[in-house]
Image (spheres, rainbow, N blue to C red):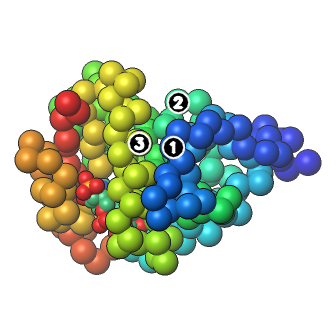
Amino acid sequence: MEQLALGILEKSKTKVIAEILNGFNGFKIEFIEKIGSDDIAQLIEVSEELVKKFGDSAKLTKSNITKYFNKDTLPFVARQNSKIIGYIIGVPLEYFTKEAWSHYDINLGKDNTMYTYAFVVSEQFQGRGGYAKSLKRVYLNYVKKRNYKFITGHTELGIAKNFSKDTETVKIFPEWYNSRVSFEYYRRPIK
Ligand SMILES: CC(C)(COP(=O)(O)OP(=O)(O)OC[C@H]1O[C@@H](n2cnc3c(N)ncnc32)[C@H](O)[C@@H]1OP(=O)(O)O)[C@@H](O)C(=O)NCCC(=O)NCCS
């Protein structure tokens, strides 16, 4: 009943974007066209990784999931042997117009910026090169194909300078919600 009320399919509608071999057998990246209840529990579990850093507001729930997985967003999941082990979600910046932080971005309202809402890989797959890298590469290519000019996001201070030499720090947030570390809002031009 609840699924019907939320308009959520039983099974996600997905498009496989990449199947990665060479030592990563069973690993693939999918674009989620429409989220289904079969994937929700796994996504919620992976989002716990974000909760460790950002607090409860970062947790996906049955009721907030369609805010990030919908026709206007770019959600990708990484699966290992059919189980979701990570995701990255691009959300047009204009989605956040009501949030004070978005107004530091001079591009707000220009429809040229994709904000990276979340990028997360389960702990056991972190630091293992291909998983996070492939997910991010697929995401960047997709954003580029959609003719966006910039990717932005919040990261812990100092991380974004590694993305590309033209990545700029737009603003530093010494306190970001409940986290104890400083964050920056970065902008990366898409080339
Ligand atoms: C962020 C995370 C997915 C990176 O995974 P990892 O296995 O540690 O990845 P690596 O250090 O090998 O980095 C892979 C790529 O992601 C990039 N990256 C790392 N952290 C990033 C971030 N916060 N935002 C965007 N890109 C990031 C790296 O620069 C690297 O890019 P490259 O392929 O161009 O070299 C992982 O550490 C994680 O899930 N952390 C907990 C959640 C979190 O803090 N997410 C970030 C904020 S939403």
Work out whether residue 129 or residue 21 is closer to the camera in this orientation and state it: 21
Which numbered disc flags the more N-terminal residue, 3 or 2? 2
Q: Which mark is residue 138?
A: 3
In the image, which disc is placed on residue 18?
1
| Mark-to-mark CA distance, 2 and 1 | 21 Å
Q: Where is residue 74 drawn, in percent x and y?
A: 49, 37
Ligand 1 falls in which quarter? bottom left
Please give the name of the residue rendered at 77% of the width and 54% of the height, measured from the top-left corner: 38
Horizontally, residue 64 falls left or right of residue 49, namely right
Please say whether residue 177 is visible from this viewpoint.
no
Percent of width and height locating residue 61: 64, 59
| Residue at image point 19% right, 52% down | 163
Q: Is residue 134 visible?
A: yes
Residue at mark 3 to residue at mark 1: CA–CA distance: 8 Å
Say which of 128 and 153 sits in front: 128
In whole angstroms, how far apart are the C-alphas of marks 3 and 2? Answer: 18 Å
Q: Secondary structure at mark 1?
A: strand
* Residue 148 coordinates in the image, percent (x, y): 31, 26
Q: Mark 3, residues whose alpha carbon is within 10 Å: few (<14), some, or many (≥20)? A: some
Question: Hey, what amino acid is under mark 3?
Answer: Val
Check the image and report above or below for 45 versus 86: below
